[in-house]
Amino acid sequence: MEVIKGGVTAAKGFKAVGIYAGIKKKRKDMALVYSVVPAKSAGTFTTNIVKAAPVKWDIKLIKEYETASAVVLNSGVANACTGAEGEINNKRMAEAMASNLNVSANSVLTCSTGVIGKQLPIDVITVGTKLLAEKMEESIEAGTMAAEAIMTTDTYSKEYAVNIQIGDKVITIGGMAKGSGMIHPNMATMLGVVTTDISISKALLQEAISANVKETFNMISVDRDTSTNDSLIILANGLAGNKEITEKNKEYDKFCKALKVVTTNLAKKMAADGEGATKLFETIVIGAESKEQAVTLSKSIITSNLVKTAVYGNDANWGRILCAMGYSGADFDPDKVDLFIESVVGKIKLVENGMAANYSEEYATKILSAKEVTAIADVKMGNETATAWGCDLTYDYVKINADYRS
Amino acid sequence: MEVIKGGVTAAKGFKAVGIYAGIKKKRKDMALVYSVVPAKSAGTFTTNIVKAAPVKWDIKLIKEYETASAVVLNSGVANACTGAEGEINNKRMAEAMASNLNVSANSVLTCSTGVIGKQLPIDVITVGTKLLAEKMEESIEAGTMAAEAIMTTDTYSKEYAVNIQIGDKVITIGGMAKGSGMIHPNMATMLGVVTTDISISKALLQEAISANVKETFNMISVDRDTSTNDSLIILANGLAGNKEITEKNKEYDKFCKALKVVTTNLAKKMAADGEGATKLFETIVIGAESKEQAVTLSKSIITSNLVKTAVYGNDANWGRILCAMGYSGADFDPDKVDLFIESVVGKIKLVENGMAANYSEEYATKILSAKEVTAIADVKMGNETATAWGCDLTYDYVKINADYRS
């Protein structure tokens, strides 16, 4: 496997672009990802009962149609809690995009992100779809423009791509995502689009992405708020020319591994760029008796406000980590837990068998001062493990969210 | 029912005091609540798997003994994650207090709050128990001193007391509590002691307090972190002289109602004085089809970081409230929800049938600027209701918790 430049335009036959349409005040606000041939489509979406209009649209389309040709995305307005008018506007967005691409509206998926409760400025968006169709390109730069156009409070755009060999063909998988706030995906992510030129059956593509999110996007949290708009869409257009993958063979496993590299990278970037975050906080639970237990414990740690503020303050306040494990709902023996922290600076044991180990607070603070910090909790019950990613809780999180709309 | 001055010393035959023993740097750090005759004891405690030594001690004592004579409390050190040494220290604290009060150690309950993972400075505490026994008084002021001595990051002490008539006797119920951080009680509260001179059976006293917390302390949250030390203890010494309550009759109901007034008041004070909080945020869910649904929805709203920061910013960002309801796990139809906000300034409808109602943002901001703000969500499915209390999430929460230990 080889890491390459680019994102959604890295794979063969995908065009993209990001433009300023006029939904937001100044920044790019619409993006398009287009496959020159119809692509097998799959996706995972928010489990929030309050689902945005584009989420409902995509779930229906992916279920009913084998392929999709494009994803049109906007930032600034989430088109959630907008009732029947919101659904009509969403359909008009897909239809306008389809008309400019000369494809069926049923092959255009939609994603929206931004403020909840406001209607889409549909006239502005309709004009935007024309611009998107005119300006789309296969270039790496065009992919980056698309990744930039879906940003809200993100501070940088998120892309990643890899090449793998399947048979005698080179397969590319590339993706983009946005995150930042209201990030606690449950079977999905805020907004993510992954493109690949692999040839694979729709059923296996869906299975691959559904299994994938459980260990990637579903393992990150910025603020424990599961959005109304979480969407992860994958398009596979088959242009790499490999023999179509129709069963879970070695090639399928190879594809899944590479897909995990791409989505893990995007998920970690999303956690690290959480609203107001100064650092990436990774938690690994080892020695668990079940995967479920490891997942529950690791997510409970990364979502605790008290742990997150301690990480911000470079404070090795490990009692908060044990406390967060204790109320997680998972069963374990607190008197057996070992706890370590690790970063580029080094690694130390903070807790041995549930009590303070003999460590230097000064050195612990140094380890925690790095940009990426890992906590490792060993519950000594079995061999299962899980990794979750979050970020610290800072003044800026409060600042950003106390006046998000103004 | 009459609201009266005082807290744990309001009822007949209870003495208390708070002193500076030397656990913390400058502030009062030990408290005593003592009944001049053995009092029926009951309590509820944290559901966190990681339980502090005093919690384990109290659960055992309340189960095995009909009565207790005293509660000795300290702040500064939580005596949690302290292993066998922690349990020995806790027992020594009870024994020292018992010796100075001339009672059995098995009649002395203990509570600790503060930093997790540090051992109690047992010599300092032993000296402290002597001082407590010498200085305890029946005065209102002595009760307030006790309430002050259990504060950690609380900004004011929390007490409340009421009188009710049972038969021809006046019964008093008074209590104190501390909260502020790591507040998300589950079947208990951070630290609370309620005293009453009512005569009641131990079984009914336990039943009353267990039912009570479900609607009071368990309905508040500051940061969704369930502490290792949550304890709510009630002592009933019978000195009011009423005929002992041994069944669920009218008198029992009257007592429960009055008890709820006391604990609701303490719980609301705890939420309003949450770490860094500038205001009390109350959420009422009405029209629910079950109590459980109403509880789940109301707690999901008050614990959302995004809702809490919006409340801090006086921003009527109702989409975040609907979003928090949507991911709560409770089932409802988002397209039927009505949402109101209310304070001393006035009341308006923000959402009608899941969509923005016609309201003035300016007026909404004015309503939200009050010190106590209520959100009312009507899910239109039935007649059940629940009320939860929380607070806003502010810069100061981050500040307090980024360097709590330094």
Image (cartoon, coloured by chain):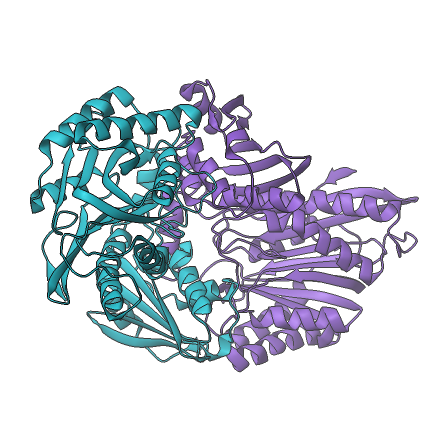
Chain colours: A purple, B cyan
Residue nearest the viewer, comparing B49 with A101: B49
Query: How many circles with numbers are drawn on the protein?
Result: 0
* Side of B355 where B269 appears, left or right: left
Q: Position of residue B269 (x, y in %)?
A: 23, 54
Residue A286 drawn above or below residue A238: above
Residue B258 drawn above or below residue B39: below
Residue nearest the viewer, comparing A55 with B199: B199
Residue drawn 31% across and 39% down? B400
The answer to whether residue B119 shows anywhere in this view is no
Residue B109 drawn above or below residue A235: above
Residue nearest the viewer, comparing B342 with A289: A289
The answer to whether residue B287 shows anywhere in this view is yes
Residue A72 drawn above or below residue A151: below
Q: Position of residue B205 (x, y in %)?
A: 30, 55
Q: Position of residue A240 (x, y in %)?
A: 86, 52
Place residue B338 in its image quadrant: bottom left
Q: Which quadrant is home to the N terminus of chain B?
A: bottom left
Q: Position of residue B53 (x, y in %)?
A: 38, 33
* Side of B338 where A224 appears, left or right: right
Residue drawn 25% across and 71% down? B250
Place residue A30 in its image quadrant: bottom right
Residue nearest the viewer, comparing A157 with B186: B186
Q: Which quadrant is home to the C terminus of chain B?
A: top left
